[in-house]
Amino acid sequence: MSELILRNRQRARPVNLPLLRRVARLLLTELFALENYELSVHLVAALDMARLNRKFLNHRGSTDVLTFDYSDKVGQAPCLSSKMSVKPQDRQVACPPLRGEVFICLDDAIAQARQFRTTWQSELVRYLVHGALHLRGYDDLRPDLRRAMKREEDRLVRELT
C-alpha cells in the first residue's frame, strides 16, 4: 500500500499542491523505485518549524527541513535503488518500505532562494528530495556523508526538473 499526504500549514506563499504531489510521486515511484511507501509532507512557517526544531532536536530557531523516519531500517546503509539498478522483483528486498514525515519550512525556502539565486519552488523540491533521502538512510552529519548526500540530492533534483 502506498500513501502520500501533503499538508500546507503556512501562508507565506500559495503552493501548487497537485504539482508538488506529482513531483513527490515521481521521486518515490520512478527515481526511488518504491511500490510501498507512506509519506506525509508538511509545509510550515518558520515559527512552527522553530517549535518542532526545539521540541525534537533541542535546537533554537527554524530550519529548512526536518525528517521523521518511522521505518524499521535502523543501522542499515543508505538505500540506493532506482529503476535502472534494481530488478522489479528485487525492489522490496533492496529497499524496505519508506515510512515517515518531512516538514518543510517555506519561509526558509524563500530566504534560501534569494541567497542561491533560484526560485522558492526549486528550493521546495530540493527540500523534498533532501527529506526523502534521509528516509532512505542518507545522513549529513559528517562532511564525507554530507558530500555523498549532496551529490545524490543534486542528481535527483536534476532528474525532477
Image: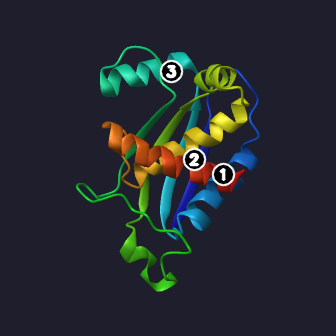
151, above or below 107, in the image:
below
Residue 34 screen position, x and y as percent: 51, 68
Q: Which mark is residue 48?
A: 3
- Of badges 2 and 3, nearer the viewer stands 2
**Crowd class of label 3 (few under 14; some 14 to 19; many from 20; radius 10 Å):** some
Q: Looking at the image, which residue is at 46% across and 68% down?
A: 81
Q: Which residue is mark 2?
A: 154
Residue 83 screen position, x and y as percent: 56, 73
Badge 3 element: helix
Which mark sits nearer the N-terminus, 3 or 1? 3
Which mark sits nearer the N-terminus, 2 or 3? 3
Comparing 6 with 34, the one in front is 34
Q: Which residue is mark 1?
A: 158
In the rendered structure, which amino acid carries the disc numbered 2?
Answer: Asp
Rendering colour mode: rainbow
In the rendered structure, which amino acid carries the disc numbered 1?
Answer: Arg
Residue 148 screen position, x and y as percent: 42, 48
Q: Looking at the image, which residue is at 50% across and 52% down?
A: 152
The answer to whether residue 46 is left or right of residue 136 is right
Q: Which mark is residue 106?
A: none
Q: Are marks 2 and 1 in contact (CB under 8 Å)?
A: yes
Comparing 149 with 6, the one in front is 149
Distance Cα–Cα, label 3 vs label 1: 30 Å
In the rendered structure, which amino acid carries the disc numbered 3?
Answer: Asp
Residue 3 placement: quadrant: bottom right
Work out whether residue 40 can be spotted.
no
Residue 141 placement: quadrant: top left
- Of badges 3 and 1, nearer the viewer stands 1
**Crowd class of label 1 (few under 14; some 14 to 19; many from 20; radius 10 Å):** few
Q: Count the marks: how many?
A: 3
**Extreme residue in the bottom direction:** 89
